[in-house]
Structure formats: C-alpha cells, structure tokens
Amino acid sequence: MTVQRSVCISGTDRGIGLALVKDYLLDGYTVFAGGITTENEALAQLSTQFPDHLHTSFLDVGSDESVKAFAAFIASKTDKLELLINNAAILGDMKQTITDVIDFDEIQRVYNITAIGAIRLTNSLIEPFLQGGQLIVNISSEAGSIRQSHRESWFGYSMAKTALNMGSTIIHTTIRKQGGRVLLIHPGWVKSAMNGTWSDAGTFTPEVAAANIRHTIMLYRDQIREQPLYLAADTGEELPW
C-alpha cells in the first residue's frame, strides 16, 4: 500500500515536533508521528481531527528495538515516504565545564539520542525513503558548528550535534547518487522543554520555528550538493561546519 504525500517525524511529544505534525496535517500530508509520551492529549485531539492522516506510535530513537518496531508500524501502512524529519533530541547538562564533576553517562545518553538516534531511524526507514521523496531533514543546531564554537560547557549536546552533522554527510554521500539528499536545519533559539521543564527563554515559539523549518525545506528541498546544506531556518543562511 502506498500513501501519497507522507512524512515521518520523530520527537513529536511537544515543541517543534508537535508543531510540525500540525502544519503537515493542515497541508494535507499523511503524518507518521513518533514520540515517547504514551498518552498525549494534543496528538489525541489531532487524531480525532485528522483520523485518516495521522498515525502515531511509541518511538524511542535511543533504542534499536523501538526504532525497528516503529519502522514495522510504518511498513504496515505504506511502502513509500516522501519526507523524513529527524527531530528527536535531548539537551542534557548545560553548566558543567571541564573543571567540574561531569556526568559522562548522561553525555552518552544525549549522544545516543541526539546524534545516533537520527542515524538509527534513517537506517530502519531507508527502504520506504528511497522509494519515496528521498529527502531527509535532520534538525541540527549552531551548537554543532566547530568553527563557531564558543561554549565552555554543553558537552553532550554540542558534541552530539557535531556528530549528527558528520553522520548526515555520510548518508548524503550515499543517497545523492540516487537523487537523495539531506538538509541540516538549525531552528534557532526556541522556547522549549528540552531539559525537562518549560523554558520561555528563547527567540521563537515552537510554532514559529516549525514554520521557519517548513519554509526552509520548501526553498531548498530539491537542491543536491556535494555536502548537505547546513542552514539557519529563520534566515536561510548557510552555517559553517
């Protein structure tokens, strides 16, 4: 079975991921949404509003078993995906410097979800992806830019986003031979609950950030370069690696 205009989005519990789900549903897409919240009121309301176009399932991108189960769930609905948006991420500690006591187990957890999670999900969905639109959007960050590095902390998140950027180039190098491509998008400073509690300290609401991401995707989705485009969502500016 083939579903037309289909998008898979990870990290849809709240924030940017949830806002992207809403936007793509309103645009007529069939959305496959994966998150770790088993009872999500916002997604439940959207399921009622778009009963034939929203398919939700548990997804922990840090788990091989969970990702495989999610991929099987999608395979039961469609054999093609137009778009894959790897959005799931966690922030981790932002305060500890190299002179402090560092929780290395937490760094590994951030790395597993924020960096490897996107590679893990892409790998499990590579078949429907290659048969579909062949566009992967990985939500990255300016924190992953080595040239612009200025922080004294944020070890897990910054290192994970840099690793995500490198993993994206490796995927892009393979799939561009068949017309595939990867976009890396920095959403900007977004009001979020990535660190467990809501923070209003940000430039963009999740809804505005999601709109900027979608606009960037529309502008650059057909461009295929030697390396992935690494872009700021609000300006379209290319970020340095």
Image (cartoon, helix red, strand yellow):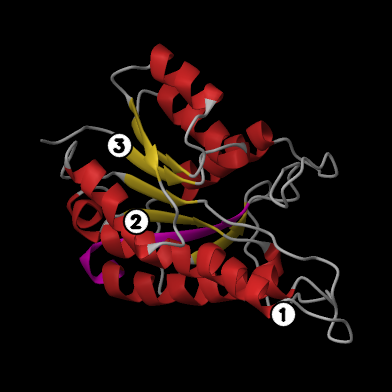
Crowd band around label 3 with a 10 angstrom C-alpha radius: few (<14), some (14–19), many (20+): many
User: Which of the marked residues, 3 or 1, is nearer the chain's N terminus?
Assistant: 3
Q: Which residues, given as a range, are shown in magenta?
A: 176-186
* Residue position for label 2: 67
Give SS at disc 1. Answer: loop
* Residue position for label 3: 6
* Residue position for label 1: 147
Along the viewing direction, whichever of 65 and 208 lies nearer the viewer: 65
180 part of magenta stretch: yes
Q: Image check: 98 left or right of 140?
A: right
Along the viewing direction, whichever of 30 and 89 lies nearer the viewer: 89
Which quarter of the picture shows residue 205?
A: top right
The disc labelled 2 sits on which kind of residue?
Val
Q: Position of residue 18 (x, y in %)?
A: 54, 34
The disc labelled 1 sits on which kind of residue?
Arg
The residue furthest bottom is: 99
Crowd band around label 1 with a 10 angstrom C-alpha radius: few (<14), some (14–19), many (20+): few
Which quarter of the picture shows residue 41?
A: top right
The disc labelled 3 sits on which kind of residue?
Ser
Looking at the image, can residue 181 be seen? no
Q: Are marks 2 and 3 in contact (CB under 8 Å)?
A: no
Work out how far the residue at label 2 is from the one at label 3, CA to CA, in angstroms.
Answer: 18 Å
Q: Which of labels 3 and 1 is toward the front?
A: 3
Give SS at disc 3. Answer: strand
Q: Image check: 116 left or right of 30?
A: right
Q: Residue at x 42, y 13 (%)?
A: 49
Q: Considering the image in quadrants, where does the C terminus appear? A: bottom right
